[in-house]
Amino acid sequence: MSLTERLNRKNKKFVAAPSAAGAAPAKQKQGTTGFSVTADEAREKEYQAIKSDIHAKIIDEMPEALQRAINQSTGDQKEVRRMVENICAEEVRNNPFAVPLGDRERLVDELISEIMGLGPIEPFLQDSSVSEVMVNGPDSIYIERSGHLIKTETRFRNAEHLMHIIDRIVSAVGRRVDESSPMVDARLLDGSRVNVIIPPLSLIGPCLTIRKFSRDVLTVDKMIEFGSFDERMAQFLEACVRGRLNIVVSGGTGSGKTTLLNVLSSYVPESERIVTLEDSAELQLHQDNLVTLETRPANIEGEGEISMRDLVRNALRMRPDRIIVGEVRTGEALDMLQAMNTGHDGSMTTAHANSARDLLSRLETMVLMSGMELPLRAIRSQIASAVDIVVQIARMRDGSRKIINISEVTGMEGDIITMQDLFRFEQQGIDSDGRLRGEFVSEGLRPMCSEKLELNGIHLPIDLFS
């Protein structure tokens, strides 16, 4: 049966349907399963079927060169849009009732998203107010906006439709996901972080989580404006980076560790060579002498894996002035600490921890995961001599992200690593709009690292810590 014949058969229901303006309440009709289906739901089902037919025709008629360009994310959207509009207009001319008048622009936009973008979730990726997109199977899509989760009415046609979009994402960065490898971390071309988990591990169908990166690169001034920290803290952190102190950004999931690391990295002078190491490349540095490295998972035969430890070892041979590790999770913590202790001052990384003190315990655990049977005192001595500053960032109850502590590692007393807080966020309550009230305060202590900063030409005013 031709596309035109299929559309004509479907059009009969559209002709019989009442118009949107002044129409009687949507009647329910009995489905074959016994469940009632509203007329609106029936029309939406017909609309999706027609869109699927037109989509298939567009793919059939699309030149091979254009298809290759789209698969490589280099296709011209104007050319694709022109082609989609022409085919849609032709179908509407041949079948005036195929698509309701108010849905024709929607049809073109959705087909463009299917062909060039990520289908139903493409509008959320284009919406700058949305910070995260969470797909819990084909029928449930949540977004995060202003720190709050919102359930949307958007959905995928079925699990196969969702898997098609997932395959498009992971294949673009050389990753794969299937039953033999049902979990994968990937990224979009703009650096947004992607996590996928599919059956048999997921019992509700394919799940997709996208943490978007802002198109506007965050600066220190913007973060101060957002209330993430104040001018004194910004001045001190800039001095720490330029003075080549080793910094660990610590926090929970979604607290803004990578964003803060990105901002801190902007302080690195242009004259220095930077090597960044990440599981999925997310950092957006703009220095000229920059090398970006990314881990690689094993192939389908289980071979060819390049781990973070491999990258850290290789980075040491690349004559780096700064090594920036996106996140330490396991044994690479030992290699990172050794790099910090062997002349690579000014290195930075992030790690998951609920407090600065918890971070030190986590680093001990990660070093033990390297397989090296080191005594605990030796590990703590490595940490105390390698890490200078711990920046603790948290996501607050109102959805805002704030630096809640800047702490200095001061050395060891016996077998205990000693620390002192330099700045902290003091919460004072919640205002009428549900936002946290508070202020950033100094503990009044002059940091012991001031000597090291002075040797590197960085002079901190005394009243900075008053």
Image (spheres, rainbow, N blue to C red):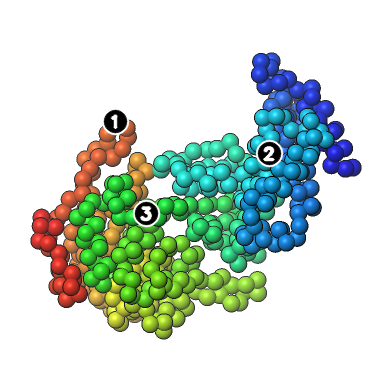
Q: Nearer the viewer, residue 361 or 166?
A: 166
Query: What residue is pinned by disc 3?
Result: 218
Q: Secondary structure at mark 3?
A: loop
Query: What residue is pinned by disc 1?
Result: 432
Which callout, 1 or 3, points to the residue nearer the camera? 3
Q: How far is mark 2 from mark 1, CA to CA?
A: 43 Å
Residue 298 lies, in percent from the top left, at 59, 72
Instruction: Name the residue type under label 2.
Output: Leu
* Image: 329 above or below 232: below
Badge 2: residue crowd in 10 Å (few <14, some 14–19, many ≥20): many
Instruction: Name the residue type under label 3.
Output: Leu
* Image: 197 above or below 275: above
Q: Is residue 199 left or right of residue 408?
A: right
Q: Residue at x 75, y 22 (%)?
A: 17
User: Which image quarter is the N terminus in?
Assistant: top right
**In this view of the protein, can residue 332 be seen by the observer?**
no
